[in-house]
Image: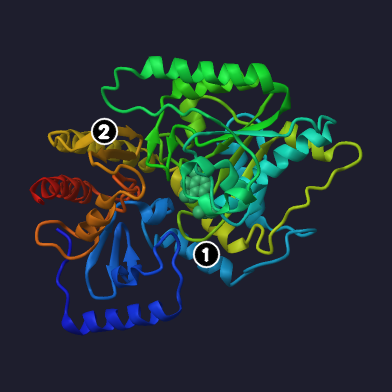
Amino acid sequence: MIEKSVSPLREELHQQLIGRDRRHVWHPFSAATSGSDLIAIESARGAVLQTADGRELLDCISSWWVNLFGHAHPRIAAAVAEQASRLEQVIFAGFTHEPAIQLAESLAGLLPGDLNRVFFSDDGSTSVEVALKMAAQYWQNIGKPERRRVMAFEGGYHGDTLGAMSAGASSGFFEAWRRWMIEVDVMPFVDTWQDDAKIQAREAEALATLDRFLEQHADEVAVMIMEPLVQGASGMRMCRPQFVVGVIERLRRHDILIVFDEVMTGFGRTGENFACDVVGVQPDLICLSKGVTGGFLPLGVTVASDRIYDSFAGAGQTMFCHGHSYTANPLGCAAANASLQLLQLPETRKSWQRIEAAHRDGLKQVSRHQLATRLRQQGTIAALNVRVDDPGYRSQIGQQLKQWFWHPHDSIDDVLIRPLGNVVYLMPPYCMNDEQLETAWTSIDRALELIMETP
Ligand SMILES: Cc1ncc(COP(=O)(O)O)c(C=O)c1O
């Protein structure tokens, strides 16, 4: 059971903090007026966040999908502290350091095939920008500048910078900037769920659409970017590995470069180290961030195949004119190295299996509700849609559920579950124990009951 009591003194302190925040701080993906709902977090350990007013909140979404092994993990914290006392930052053009070299070696070893060339940036969005820019320049490097088109899946989300927004425009978040974006060809994405009787027919139809597009335009296409297996931000939409394989086979036939955006799916979320391991294919470029540092520090990584890198390194030496002030920040790299060591412990895989089993039971538990539809799971991610009249990211039910989950409520434990509109999902840190997983599922089950009871 999660600690719920709030002392008046701490509540007052909390209110003061929120008041100060409201005067100067602008929050991401939050309505400018939503400050009264804010919760100040004072500290965190394992899967539990401690609020400034003394409550405990169970972090069921790994704090926006970044945390892997629990908050304040002592091994990662120690690695960062040790690195901070030795070298906190150095320019990465013309200089290098051991933490970055070690991280590049480890990633090249973990990733499939010849994904050997590691380029560092700051976050998920920049890792995507880098991948798209590398793909664009690759075709110029090898004398095929006519290959300029970019393909993406409908519903894909790839970040908030201009190139990433363009690739993810169909996610629906970016209408305000549509006229600023580059043109992207959007292909149908076929999501699926338990007892989806029509999946094969829908996949066949989508692949036929792709075939028709490629018949006309394949020679003009530079690259296709995709979130493999799970589209995160557009509602934890999951597809079958077979579907991804079908798409990849077609792209390969036309020598189109493939970018896997594994910013969210990387580092064990889908039941293997990376979604590309589940699917069994090697992309030309892979984008990583979020979990790469175990959730401690911002870091983006784009890993390219030898073929891409060699086009920059051959005769004539073409420069990739991209770099950030904090490229390969040693603190981020140190956190990532410690996190990758934890990732490779046998216990970690056992945790994935334990969470997967808890999700299976949890989905079964909530399947009794008429309102729970499209139940689905991929590895340690589980999701369902709440049946509502206004589905989608702006669904009213999302706000209602946040109120129930985040703020003190008589019959629901305090849990950080942040629905994507009418989509409720869990993506816990791997340290979440069975009792906490049960708390998470019971909270969802109870919330579904409350929706039924609410007139
Ligand atoms: C698949 C995917 N790509 C890219 C991004 C952007 O990452 P960031 O928010 O770190 O820029 C996200 C963020 O949620 C993501 O889920």
Q: Could you tell me if the residues under marks 1 and 2 are in contact, i.e. CB atoms within 8 Å? A: no
According to the picture, the residue beneath numbered tag 1 turns out to be 80
Residue 204: x and y in percent read 45, 15
State the mark number for residue 338. Answer: none
Residue 95: x and y in percent read 76, 60
Residue 132: x and y in percent read 66, 42
Q: Quadrant of residue 110?
A: top right
Which of the two labelled residues, at mark 1 and mark 2, occupies the earlier sequence position? 1
- Identified by mark 1, the residue type is Val
State the mark number for residue 375. Answer: 2
Q: If the image is split into quadrants, where does the N terminus sit?
A: bottom left
Q: Is disc 2 placed on a helix, strand or loop?
A: strand
Q: Nearer the viewer, residue 27 or 104?
A: 27
Q: In 3D space, how far apart are the residues under numbered discs 1 and 2 (Cα atoms)?
A: 39 Å
From where the camera sits, is residue 45 visible? yes
From where the camera sits, is residue 301 visible? no
Q: Quadrant of residue 19?
A: bottom left
Residue 174, compared with residue 352, is above or below; it is: below
Q: Is 184 displayed left or right of 220 in the figure? A: left
Q: How many tags in the picture? A: 2
Q: Residues within 10 Å of mark 2 (few under 14, many from 20)?
A: many
Residue 210, compared with residue 163, is above or below; it is: above
Q: Is disc 1 placed on a helix, strand or loop?
A: helix
